[in-house]
Image (tube, helix red, strand yellow):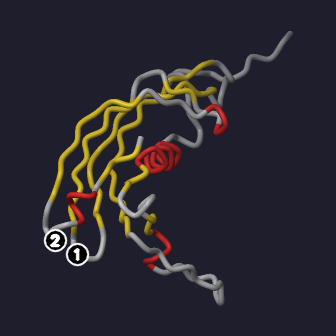
Amino acid sequence: MRIDVSELLKKVGSESKIETELKVSYPEDGIELVKPVKLKVKLVNTGEEILLTGTLSTAAKMECSRCLGPSVSKVDAELEEHFRTEVGERVAKDLELEPDDFVFPLEGGHFVPIDEVVRQVIITALPTQPICSQNCKGLKEEE
């Protein structure tokens, strides 16, 4: 999904709110979403960029890190991303990140690539060691 921000780019301070559901999954990242992604976002033209803020919620089926059985993890995350029509490329002189390293380019000069934002936010919001339940005893040894 891409959001056309042509109208927002015409006037500094203009804003738009969007509520939608996305039916997506990311098998290439080992993520199976079991619920649609509920997305509530606000886009604002700050003069220098388009600021996207909001929330997303979904649930992902994962492998329990204790017993290797199925586990469903709820995902609720805050969004804050910055988009510019032009994002300069930087030559890596040192290993320090700069604020511009966290800015997405607008696709075609006026589209916000929301799919990639959602994918990255979900990946970072998922637990690193999901468990199927608090009482999970892990793998059982065979006797």
Report the amino acid beneath label 1: Gly
Q: Which residue is mark 2?
A: 12
Q: Residue furthest bottom?
A: 93
Q: Horizontally, is 83 left or right of 116 in the view?
A: left
Quadrant of the image containing the N terminus: top left
Query: What is the secondary structure assignment of the residue under circle 2?
Result: loop
Look at the picture and state if 112 lies above or below 71: below
In the rendered image, residue 115, in percent from the top left (x then y), is placed at: 46, 44
* In contact (CB < 8 Å): disc 1 and disc 2: yes
Q: Which residue is mark 1?
A: 47
Quadrant of the image containing the C terminus: top right
Q: Horizontally, is 89 left or right of 43 in the view?
A: right
Q: Residue furthest top?
A: 143
Residue drawn 26% across the image and 49% down it: 54
Residue drawn 60% across the image and 19% down it: 70
Residue drawn 84% across the image and 12% down it: 142
Look at the picture and state if 118 lies above or below 53: above
Quadrant in the picture for residue 67: top right
In the rendered image, residue 71, in percent from the top left (x then y), is placed at: 55, 23
Look at the picture and state if 74 lies above or below 86: above
Q: Residues within 10 Å of mark 2 (few under 14, many from 20)?
A: some
Query: What is the secondary structure assignment of the residue under circle 1?
Result: loop
Count of all numbered marks drawn on residues in the image: 2
Q: Horizontally, is 68 left or right of 47 in the view?
A: right
Q: CA distance from mark 1 to mark 2?
A: 5 Å
In the rendered image, residue 39, in percent from the top left (x then y), is placed at: 31, 38
Q: Earlier in the sequence, mark 1 or mark 2?
A: 2
Residue drawn 23% across the image and 37% down it: 19
Look at the picture and state if 137 lies above or below 74: above
Q: Residues within 10 Å of mark 1 (few under 14, many from 20)?
A: some
Report the amino acid beneath label 2: Val
The mark found on residue 13 in the picture is none
